[in-house]
Amino acid sequence: MSEINIKHLAKMLNLAPSTVSRALNDSYEISQATKDRVQALAKSLHYQPNPFARSLRAQKSKTIAVIIPERINNYFSQVIEGIESITQEFGYHLLVYSTHENLDTEKKILSYLVNGRADAIVMSVSSQTREIDHLENVFQNKVPIIFFDRICREIPTTKFITNDYQSGYNATMHLIEKGCKKIFFLLLSRDISIGKERLRGYIDAVKDSGLAFSESWVVQCSQDEAGNLALIKRFLYGMDRPDGILASVEKLAISTYQAAKEMRLNMPKDFKMISFSNMKIAGLLNPPLSTISQPAFQVGAECAKLLMQKLTKPKQPPLEDRVIEIPSKMELRESSGD
């Protein structure tokens, strides 16, 4: 027999092809009895719909593009899991792209996607993203886009964030309450939204506590892991080292662990640390790492719910221009003295 298609199924069931198609797509317009008949026959004949052919007819790709700064990050992998938990129910597929923290790569990806390769975009911008012409181009081409974590406030769409300012403030206060008087803040980028807010919370906490803050306490790191390790080892060397560290991203916390091990420093005796991190093994590190964990899975699921409503229901309005904040959770462990 030739390959089974919707026309074959329709002829065997004495139904219109459009009825079979809607039944296979679980349309509310089709009775449950008809859906059951169609789906039972399709299953018995091992019929597999072609999502790409079907989407071409509907002028939809049935794909959501997810653009992240890096793949080796527990937060982003959990966001993707959250998105998939919703989109799979609707037959949508994910295309995951990594910018590798590079603005030119980000521009190329968006240029590729704006030509109809994806029905919508979920995105966290790179640490190099300062100009936003490429983001405005996506919006002007009416491709639905949602930002999360590292957001672009200028684009009038929905953005999901966590309480980065308050988390930075609370984490710093925790170190101060543990007796720290010289707290360094390890920063990846001053330009991205999360870096700005976490830094602002840290600075306010230090100043509110009356500590003798110095700009040198804010340590600008980079994407170069070897360079970060050397930088951290330099400021940990000697008796005037910081007695507390707040790492704004987990990769900088890992570099600090490595530096401490190579220098035979004891944490939390020689210095205490807390980090923004969604690392599932944080409690297994030596010592267990105190973390501020973002609600990554929930963020992904909420992004997907909004997009599925937008893409699967007729005559939906544009995505609302608003910022939705979902709080993070602080988990205190031995690295910060608990």
Image: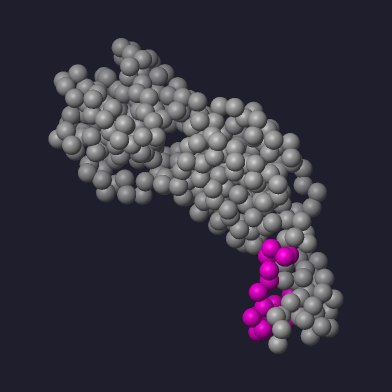
Q: Where, by quadrant of the figure, is residue 148 drawn?
A: top right
**Residue 5 image point, x, y percent:** 74, 77
**Residue 102 image point, x, y percent:** 50, 36
Q: Is residue 276 magenta?
A: no
In front here: 67 or 44? 67
Q: Is residue 50 magenta?
A: yes
Residue at the image position 64 percent from the left and 35 percent from the top: 135
Residue at the image position 62 percent from the left and 42 percent from the top: 110
Q: Locate residue 211 relative to residue 194 in the image: left or right.
A: left
Q: Indicate the quadrant containing the C terminus: top left, top right, bottom left or bottom right.
A: top left
Q: Where, by quadrant of the figure, is residue 206 drawn?
A: top left
- Segment colored magenta: 32-54
Q: Locate residue 92 relative to residue 190 in the image: left or right.
A: right
In front here: 199 or 219? 219
Q: Indicate the quadrant containing the N terminus: top left, top right, bottom left or bottom right.
A: bottom right
Residue 299 seen in this snapshot = no
Q: How many labels sit on residues?
A: 0
**Residue 39 image point, x, y percent:** 70, 77
> How is this picture coloured?
one colour
**Residue 222 image point, x, y percent:** 39, 31
Residue at the image position 54 percent from the left and 34 percent from the top: 103
Residue 218 seen in this snapshot = yes
Residue at the image position 23 percent from the left and 34 percent from the top: 259
Q: Is the stretch drawn in magenta largely helix, strand or loop?
A: helix
Q: Is 142 rendered above or below residue 179?
A: below
Work out which residue is located at the far bottom of the displayed protein and give it: 1
Q: Is 91 rendered above or below residue 166?
A: below
Q: Is 63 rendered above or below residue 327?
A: below
